[in-house]
Image (cartoon, rainbow, N blue to C red):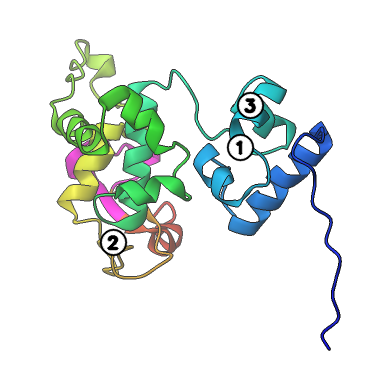
Amino acid sequence: MKDYKFEFVRAKNTPVTDEEIISDLKQVAAAIKPRTVTQKTYGEHGKYDTSNVGRRFGTWNKALNAAGLTISNKCNITDDALYENILVLWQHYGRQPRRADLSKPPSTISQSAYNRRFQSWSTALKSFVEFANSVEIAVPAPTDKSASTRQVAARDPSLRLRFKVLSRDLFTCQHCGASPAKSLGVELHVDHVVPWSKGGETGLENLQTLCSKCNLGKSNL
């Protein structure tokens, strides 16, 4: 005869402590291993009602803070930050990011933030592409002879410029041909052909896509 094991079942109206909620949030985060826990994810895996958790701590984000977890849904995120996150994903996967990619690293912004700003993920992608393909404001040329040999652009390429370099190079390392679209773990960098420290400009013609291995091997040569 199979032994019967008693199991404790909490009564519906039994008060729940803050410590129990925080502990359960941490357990859900540990089980699914994300950077954060969204209300939808917790509703699928957690013990307690998400609305009660939010009321207990004031907001869902405050509950995450209390549990030491990353905020899942930031408000008032700038367009630049939203675009930057899209480029990070595009660079990471070597392809146009999908909606599902927002729920896992390296994304740091959830889908709801894009829905609030652009109404849909598709519209957000179209807006990003239009932004990235637009013409940047040209840097005025030096007007005096003493400044004629000075670099006129900053060392780090802008988001627009990085996207243009990566797109031109088909998100592929120009030395070894590695691409995150073909091999997991490939990390792409946008690098100066002529090093910036040696007078190389931060322009489309002097930038190239390299994988992290080739870029580290190239160093400042």
Give the mark, 3 or 1, whose residue is nearer the N terminus: 3
Q: Secondary structure at mark 2?
A: loop
Stretch in magenta: 194-209
- The three-letter code of the residue at mark 1 reads Thr
Tell me which numbered mark, 1 or 2, is placed earlier along the sequence: 1
Looking at the picture, tell me which residue is in the foreground, 48 or 125.
48
First-in-chain label (2 vs 3):
3
User: At which x and y percent is residue 217?
Assistant: 44, 63
Report the mark closest to the observer, 2 or 3: 3
Q: Can the viewer see residue 156 in this picture? A: no
Q: Quadrant of the N terminus?
A: bottom right
Mark 2 to mark 3: distance in Å? Answer: 46 Å
Residue under the point 36% across and 50% down:
100
Question: Residue 69 appears at what percent x and percent y?
Answer: 66, 39
Position of residue 216 relative to residue 60, above or below, is below
The kind of residue tagged 3 is Gly
Q: Nearer the viewer, residue 111 or 143?
A: 111
Most extreme residue toward the front is 1
Q: Residue at 37% across / 50% down in the picture?
A: 101
Q: Give residue 75's position: percent from left, percent from top.
A: 47, 21
* Residue at 42% across, 59% down: 212
* 26 vs 2, nearest the viewer: 2
Give the left or right position of residue 199, taking residue 49 as reference. Answer: left
Q: Is label 3 in a helix, a strand or a loop?
A: helix
Mark 1 highlights which residue?
70
Residue 89 in the image: above or below residue 157:
below
Residue labelled with disc 3: 54
Q: Is residue 206 magenta?
A: yes
The residue carrying mark 2 is 173
